[in-house]
Amino acid sequence: MNAQSVKHIHRVTALILLTAILFYLFFQINKRSPFVEANPFAVDPYDAVGSIAIQVAVLISLLSYARVLRWRDEATQNKASLILHGHILVLAAIFMPLCSYALAEFVQLVPPSLWRSLLIAELGSMFLLTLICGLALWAVFTGMPTAPPPPNLTPADAIDDLWSLVRVPVVRAGSIFPPPLVT
């Protein structure tokens, strides 16, 4: 795979990671005052769906970003299929709670207010951002050959990928850190 393709995958991965972080903030901020009074999805079962989804979305998007960083640093680490599957899981983990939140907006009658209007605007923005991520993912991976993942992957491989979140920036900033730390 050429460097330009890896660069495009890195960009869409960064966008999906940012979306997962924004989804986390959307979920956490809207459970607090003044939004909680206007928030029909701050209670179970809607809250339970979101609680699980934010953990899945943030963890998998972070792992996918780590895989891309490692791939950019070590060209032999082509994990395009793992990255693609991770992105699909992240977008599904974001989309499903958003659908349940939209359902809550129709099922639970909450009096109109400024906070409710803002909450609905945030919900619509999250839907739009998720759609943009899906389209970007489709555009980047359409026609791109992805080899199946190795059959012998272990949790240690995921830990090695996550370690690249620390290793790659430290190596790139090697002039700042003492040499024994970088090597």
Image: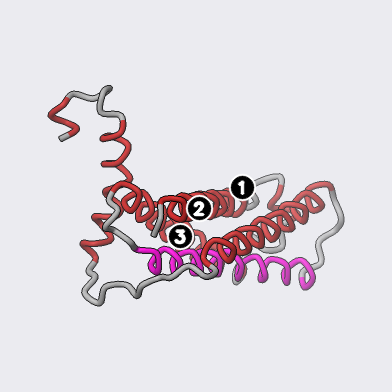
- Which element is circle 1 on? helix
Dot in front, 1 or 3: 3
Name the kind of residue labelled 2 in the image.
His
The residue tagged 1 is 29
Dot in front, 2 or 1: 2
Residue 15, how many percent across, how many down? 55, 51
Judge the density around disc 1: few (<14), some (14-19), many (≥20) Cα neighbours within 10 Å.
few
Residue at 27 percent across and 50 percent down: it is: 74
Residue at 40 percent across and 69 percent down: it is: 81
Name the kind of residue labelled 3 in the image.
Gln
Q: Earlier in the sequence, mark 2 or mark 3?
A: 2
Q: Is residue 169 above or below residue 94?
A: above
> In 3D space, how far apart are the residues under numbered discs 2 and 1 (Cα atoms)?
31 Å
Choose between 111 and 29: the one closer to the eye. 29
The reply to whether the magenta stretch includes residue 37 is: no
Which mark identifies residue 8?
A: 2
Dot in front, 2 or 3: 2
Q: Is residue 99 above or below residue 23?
A: below
Residue 124's quadrant in the figure? bottom right
Residue at 19 percent across and 33 percent down: it is: 182
The segment highlighted magenta reads: 79-107
The residue tagged 3 is 55
Which mark identifies residue 47?
A: none
On the rendered structure, is 152 left or right of 115? left
> In 3D space, how far apart are the residues under numbered discs 1 and 3 (Cα atoms)?
15 Å
Choose between 81 and 57: the one closer to the eye. 81
Q: Earlier in the sequence, mark 1 or mark 3?
A: 1
Residue 105, how many percent across, how many down? 76, 66
